[in-house]
Image (cartoon, rainbow, N blue to C red):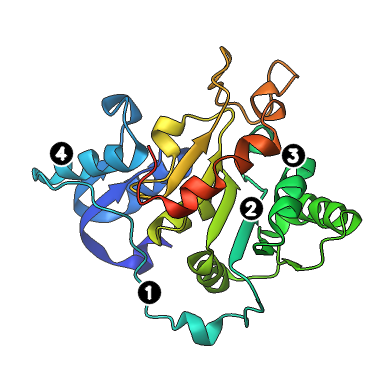
Amino acid sequence: MTRKLGKFDKYFSFRNSIRSNLYKFFIRSNLKFKYKRSSFQNSHQVDKYNKFINKSLNIDLPAMSLKIYSDINLKETSKEISKNKPMLGINPGASYGSAKRWYPEEFATVAADLCNQYDIFIIGGPNEKSISADIEKLLIKKGVTNYQNLAGRTNISELIHLVSNFDLFITGDSGPMHLAACYQVPTISIFGPTRDRETSQWLNQKSVIIKKNLDCQPCMQRTCPLKHHKCMKLIKARDVLIHVEAVVNSSSIK
């Protein structure tokens, strides 16, 4: 497979796995660089990768804000967005593991509290359809009707288009969270077992992090090793709701 790719001037590997090591071995390039986690510590992941590139190429460029470059016309490829109010995005999933997921009851409580101000859009991939369905059921019980459950129903282009149009985004530590940073979407990010210092939104001027700062945080485990999941269980809807006005209206959240 790698032979079909031809020869490269330079090759960079940001991963440390058997597959990435095999790729590095077989890729044809005179200059090969591999990211070593131990060489870059105590900073945001974006900054770490930027330092890796700088060191590899002997340059000194700053890490800039995130951008998405695409020649796809998102308005043409995306599904029509039906809304009468500003858009609130709800992203309950996290592919890393269940430890990173906040609870459907709390997401639903937040959405129900804000439904008079926002139209609700639940997003996620195929693996998040179950938790999204749980939120939908709770919204129905609460009498909320101005929502759309789009989990598992969008391709990448459609997801990007949706996120870029959100007026407020409530999410866990996830890929869509970083998409929102690209478009400076006002975002409330809920963190549990992972290091927000390393994986929070990069240079989003309207961003706030919700976490509990427990002694067991961050454990970096896919499931709670202590079986209590307090890092997420102790975060309640009110902890998110008290930040909504500030994150939407402020030009910079510290």
The amino acid type, in three-letter code, at marker 2 is: Asn
Task: Tell me residue 39's x, y (percent).
Answer: 26, 26
* Residue on which the image places disc 1: 70
| Discs 4, 1 touching: Cβ within 8 Å | no
The amino acid type, in three-letter code, at marker 4 is: Lys
Task: Tell me residue 49's x, y (percent).
Answer: 29, 42
| Discs 1, 3 touching: Cβ within 8 Å | no
* Residue on which the image places disc 4: 55
Q: Nearer the viewer, residue 84 or 48?
A: 84
Mark 4 or 2: in front is: 2
* Residue on which the image places disc 2: 91
The amino acid type, in three-letter code, at marker 1 is: Ser
Q: How dense is the environment of label 3, judged by Cα within 10 Å: few (below 14), some, or many (20 and up)? A: some
Above or below for 43 versus 85: above
Task: Tell me residue 209's x, y (percent).
Answer: 50, 37
Quick one: label 1 or label 2, which is nearer the N terminus? 1
Name the residue rendered at 28%, 29% in the picture. 40
Mark 1 or 2: in front is: 2
Callout 2: helix, strand or loop? strand
Name the residue rendered at 47%, 39% in the picture. 18
Q: The C terminus lies in which quarter of the figure?
A: top left
* Residue on which the image places disc 3: 103
